[in-house]
Image (spheres, grey):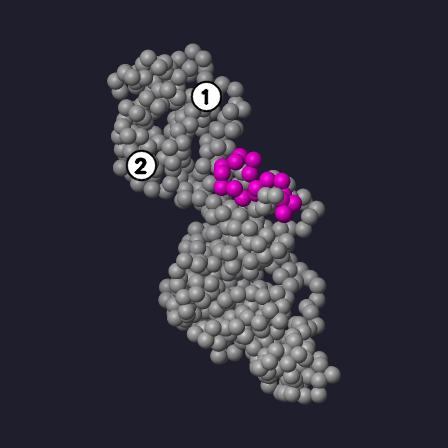
C-alpha cells in the first residue's frame, strides 16, 4: 500500500513534479498567465518571468504550454535547459525545434540563422501561425546565447514579430538584462513572481489534497494552525510548502496521527543539522504585528514598546496602507486575505525571519473581522484532569507536581489532595499507588517568555517516564502543559529554565549537549484560546 492510501487519498498530493493538475491559481499566477497569453496573441515578442527558487515558475511554464496547446494556430516549442556547449549547438537545437530540415542542421551558424528565419516567416506569414519559444531555467543562458536570442528576436515583418519568446528565470537573470540593454529594451513584459501569502498557502494545500482525492465532507488533514506553521516555516514559497507538507504526511503516518497540528508541523520543520541556529526574531515580530492588527489601538502602545526594546531600528507595524514587513494578505495587487477556521498561530524560525520583508500587513476591516472570528471560535471544554500516574520507586508527589504545574506550594498540593480523597498524606505515597493530577489553571505565560522544547508526549505517564530516564549531562527538564480546542491536551517536555531574551535562548541552545541541541525547538509564541496548566516564572 502506498503511503497516501493510508490517508484515504488516491494520488500523491505533494509531489514536486510540475503536474498541471495540481496547479493552484493564485491571483499573481493567474495574472501572470493572462498577461503572457495576451502578449503572445498580440505578437509582442519577448516576455520574461523571474522569481526566487521555488516560487512556481516551472509550473506556470507548464500551465502556459497547456493553455497554448488548446489554442488554434499556435506552435509551442520548449527548451527546458538552455545550457549548451557552443553557440552552434544552441542554434542547431532551435532549428530542429522549429522544423528546419536535417540536411541544413549541419550548416554554419550564419546559414542556420537564415534557415530559422525562413521557416518562422513561412509559418507566420503563409500559414498564419504564431511561433512560440519557451525557455525554462533562463538564468543558465550564456552571454553568447543571449546574443543569438537577440538576433532571432529581430526577425519580423512590418507588422509583427516572427517569434514570440517567453523566458522563465531566477532573479539573477535581471542582472543579465542590465548588461544587455538591447535585449531588455525588447522585453514587452517582465513579471516578478513573489512568495504566497498565508491564505494562498492554505488554498494551495487544500487544492492539492482535493485533487489527490480528499473529500470535502471529511475532516481537515491540516488544522488551520498547522497551515500557519507551514506558512511561517516556508516563507510562502510553493516548492518549500509542497516539500514540507509531504514530510508532514509521512510524519503523521509514522506517529499514527490523522491530523497535522501546529506542533507536528513545527517538529518536522525545525532545523536539525546545526546547533543554535533557530532564529526566533521573525516569530516575535509576527506575533506582535498580528496582535496590533487584531486588537488595534489597545495593543499598539505595547507593540511599539516591545519593538523599541528588541530592535534598535524601527520595524513598522501597519494597521492599514502598505508596509514592507510581514503579510496577512496574499501576494498580488491589493488582495484582501481571508483566514477562516481555527486560530492562527505564529511560530519562529529562520525562514520566517527571512520572509518578513517580502509582503505587507493588510489591516483592513475584513482581515480584522476574520481574525477576530477565529479567536471567538469555541471548541470542547478543557479537561477536568490532566492524567493518572502510577508512582514508581523514588518518585515524590511534591516534585512531580512542581514539574507539572511549575510550583508545589500548599495551594497546589491541597488541590491535588482533594482530587485524591483515598490518599491520607501525599508525602507518604508509595510505589504502585496511583495519583490523579487535576487540571489547575495557571496564568498565561508572561510577555517575552521563550521555551526550549525537546519533545512532546501523549500522556503524563509517558512524560514522567521520559523525565526519569534523562541523561545526567542534560539540563533539568520539566513539563509545559496546556489545552487548545483544536490541538487537545498538549504535554511538552521543556528545559526547566524559562528565557526572557531571544539572544539568551539562542545562546543556551549552543550550550546544550549535541544530541539535545539537534532536536530542540525554540518556542516564543503560544496559541491563542489556550488554557495553561503550567506556571512559567523567572526560573
| Residue at 52% over, 50% down | 247
Dot 1 surroundings within 10 Å: few (below 14), some, or many (20 or more)? some
- x, y percentage for residue 294? 57, 61
Q: Mark 2 points at which residue?
A: 177
The residues colored magenta run 5-22
Q: How far apart are marks 1 and 2 (CA)?
A: 26 Å
Residue 17: within the magenta? yes
Taking the view exactly as shown, the residue that stands out farthest to the right is: 422
| Residue at 65% over, 84% down | 429
| Residue at 61% over, 65% down | 458
Q: Is the magenta stretch mostly helix, strand or loop?
A: loop
Quadrant the N terminus occupies: top right
Q: In the drawing, what numbered circle is on residue 207?
A: none
- Visible residue check, residue 196: no
Taking 382 as reference, is 12 above or below it?
above
- x, y percentage for residue 522? 47, 65
Amino acid at each position: 500500500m502506498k503511503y497516501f492510501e493510508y490517508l484515504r487519498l488516491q494520488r500523491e498530493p505533494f509531489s514536486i513534479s510540475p503536474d498541471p493538475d495540481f496547479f493552484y491559481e493564485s491571483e499573481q499566477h493567474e495574472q501572470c498567465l493572462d498577461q503572457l497569453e495576451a502578449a503572445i496573441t498580440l505578437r509582442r515578442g519577448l516576455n520574461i518571468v523571474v522569481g526566487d527558487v521555488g516560487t512556481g515558475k516551472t509550473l506556470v511554464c507548464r500551465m502556459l504550454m497547456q493553455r497554448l496547446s488548446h489554442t488554434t494556430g499556435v506552435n509551442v516549442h520548449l527548451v527546458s535547459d538552455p545550457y549548451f556547449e557552443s553557440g552552434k549547438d544552441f542554434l542547431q537545437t532551435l532549428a530542429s525545434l522549429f522544423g528546419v530540415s536535417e540536411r541544413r542542421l549541419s550548416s554554419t551558424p550564419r546559414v542556420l540563422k537564415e534557415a530559422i528565419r525562413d521557416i518562422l516567416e513561412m509559418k507566420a506569414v503563409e500559414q498564419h501561425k504564431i511561433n512560440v519559444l519557451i525557455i525554462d531555467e533562463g538564468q543558465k543562458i550564456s552571454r553568447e546565447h543571449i546574443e543569438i536570442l537577440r538576433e532571432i528576436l529581430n526577425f519580423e515583418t512590418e507588422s509583427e514579430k516572427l517569434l514570440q519568446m517567453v523566458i522563465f528565470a531566477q532573479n539573477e537573470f535581471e542582472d543579465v538584462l542590465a548588461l544587455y540593454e538591447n535585449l531588455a529594451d525588447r522585453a514587452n513584459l517582465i513579471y516578478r513572481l513573489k512568495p504566497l501569502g498565508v491564505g494562498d498557502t492554505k488554498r494551495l494545500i487544500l487544492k492539492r489534497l482535493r485533487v489527490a482525492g480528499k473529500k470535502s465532507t471529511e475532516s481537515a488533514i491540516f488544522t488551520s494552525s498547522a497551515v500557519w506553521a507551514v506558512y511561517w516555516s516556508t516563507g510562502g514559497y510553493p516548492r518549500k510548502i509542497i516539500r514540507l507538507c509531504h514530510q508532514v504526511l509521512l510524519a503523521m503516518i509514522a506517529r499514527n496521527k490523522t491530523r497535522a497540528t501546529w506542533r507536528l508541523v513545527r517538529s518536522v520543520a525545525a532545523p536539525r543539522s546545526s546547533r543554535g541556529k533557530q532564529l526566533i526574531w521573525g516569530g516575535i515580530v509576527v506575533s506582535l504585528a498580528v496582535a496590533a492588527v487584531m486588537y488595534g489601538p489597545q495593543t499598539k502602545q505595547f507593540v511599539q514598546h516591545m519593538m523599541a526594546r528588541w530592535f534598535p531600528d524601527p520595524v513598522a507595524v501597519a494597521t492599514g496602507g502598505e508596509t514592507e514587513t510581514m503579510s496577512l494578505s496574499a501576494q498580488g495587487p491589493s488582495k484582501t486575505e481571508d483566514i477562516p477556521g481555527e486560530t492562527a498561530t505564529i511560530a519562529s524560525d529562520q525562514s520566517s525571519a527571512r520572509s518578513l520583508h517580502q509582503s505587507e500587513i493588510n489591516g483592513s476591516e475584513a482581515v480584522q473581522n476574520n481574525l477576530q472570528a477565529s479567536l471567538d471560535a469555541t471548541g470542547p471544554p478543557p479537561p477536568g484532569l490532566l492524567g493518572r500516574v502510577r508512582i514508581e520507586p523514588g518518585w515524590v508527589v511534591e516534585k512531580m507536581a512542581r514539574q507539572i504545574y511549575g510550583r508545589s506550594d500548599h495551594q497546589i498540593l491541597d488541590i491535588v489532595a482533594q482530587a485524591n480523597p483515598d490518599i491520607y498524606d501525599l508525602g507518604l505515597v508509595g510505589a504502585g499507588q496511583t495519583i490523579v493530577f487535576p487540571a489547575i489553571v495557571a496564568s498565561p505565560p508572561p510577555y517575552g517568555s521563550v521555551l526550549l522544547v525537546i519533545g512532546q508526549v501523549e500522556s503524563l505517564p509517558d512524560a514522567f517516564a521520559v523525565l526519569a530516564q534523562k541523561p545526567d549531562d542534560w539540563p533539568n527538564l520539566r513539563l509545559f502543559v496546556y489545552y487548545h480546542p483544536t490541538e487537545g491536551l498538549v504535554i511538552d517536555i521543556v528545559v526547566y529554565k524559562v528565557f526572557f531574551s531571544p539572544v539568551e535562548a539562542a545562546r543556551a541552545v549552543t550550550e546544550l549537549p549535541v544530541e539535545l541541541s539537534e532536536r530542540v525547538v525554540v518556542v516564543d509564541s503560544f496559541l491563542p484560546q489556550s488554557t495553561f496548566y503550567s506556571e512559567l516564572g523567572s526560573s
